[in-house]
Image (cartoon, rainbow, N blue to C red):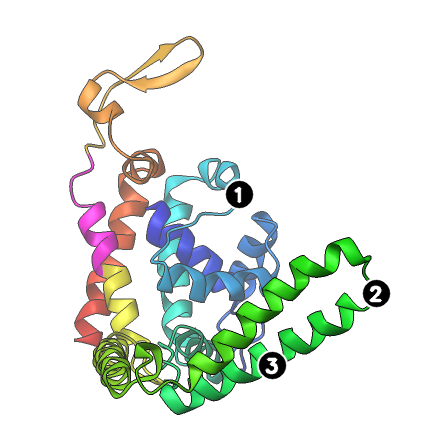
Amino acid sequence: MKTILFILISVVFALGSIANKLLDDKIHKVLTQFNISEDFAKRQILSNITGPSYYIPNLKVLKNLALGERAEIVKTIGTGIKEFVKSEEFIKNYNQYLEDRKPSPPEAPKYSEQLKKEHKESLTKSISEMEKQMTTLPTDQKAMFQDVIGQLKQQLKDVDNPNNPMFSSDMDTYIKQNYDMQIDTYNAQIAEWEKNYPLNNPYPMIKNWLERFLDNSKDIDFNAQLKNEKGKQLFVNSAYERKDNQWKLYFRAGKEPVEAARTFARQWLTEIQ
């Protein structure tokens, strides 16, 4: 329940000043109770849905609420979330999220003529710099520099050698093949990206978010027994103790709010589908 319930809480908190006044006095009270700002809540909406995440702010406050109040919060927040994700503000942030994660195309390749030109320029520059530096060195150190400069000049000559494999037509063929493979990979990534992140349409993400919650919260044993051990509440059933934190969170939230969240999720999924 932490899941939808608190995500919903964070989300609804984000609805602070929507024109249709979704946030009534009761929601404002909840916002104050949880000590959450509207700006923070707005950031959490997209973060939770795209995660998918089920972050719950200020859990201690939630645990102190009456069960009936928790369930009512879930219902109210659910309505608020559904309205907010249709807002221009949310869609704008969603589209920016997509753009930030859009695969980048591979850089255009450099072929032998360009590589040869750049390599010659680099060698020429190095030779010139070393020759200038050599004039400032003691005589006993110049010999070493002369050897290095000689090697660089030989490399410069080798660049224009028609038999140099680094700048051959075979190398160009290999470069193009490699680039074509990168393009194929990029096109596949773009197709997957467009499928998973349709522009102006966050509902595939929302659908995944809701389905994940329903799957994770389907088998909570709210009658599980606890024991106190060294000041900690542990499950008597060791299998439950090995459950993840999300499962335990739903258990601690209680059956009523979790079921309210599941009802909300199922109804919204029906609308989406």
Look at label 1 and name its amino acid: Asn
Q: Nearer the viewer, residue 128 or 97?
A: 128
Picture coordinates of residue 49 (x, y %)?
A: 36, 63
The quarter holding residue 220 reads top left
Picture coordinates of residue 144 (x, y %)?
A: 66, 57
Residue drawn at the location 48% of the way across and 60% of the way down: 44
Look at label 3 and name its amino acid: Thr
Report if the CB atoms under discs 2 and 1 are less than 8 Å apart.
no
Crowd rating for badge 1 (residues with CA inside 10 Å; few <14, some 14–19, many 20+)? few
In the rendered image, is residue 250 in sight? yes
Kindly identify which residue carries mark 3: 124
The quarter holding residue 160 reads bottom left
Picture coordinates of residue 120 (x, y %)?
A: 52, 83
Q: Main secondary structure of the magenta part?
A: helix
Q: Is residue 195 magenta?
A: no
- Name the disc covering residue 58, or none: 1
Name the secondary structure under disc 3.
Answer: helix
Mark earlier in primary sequence (1, 3):
1
Q: CA distance from mark 1 to mark 3?
A: 65 Å
Kindly identify which residue carries mark 2: 136
Look at label 2 and name its amino acid: Thr
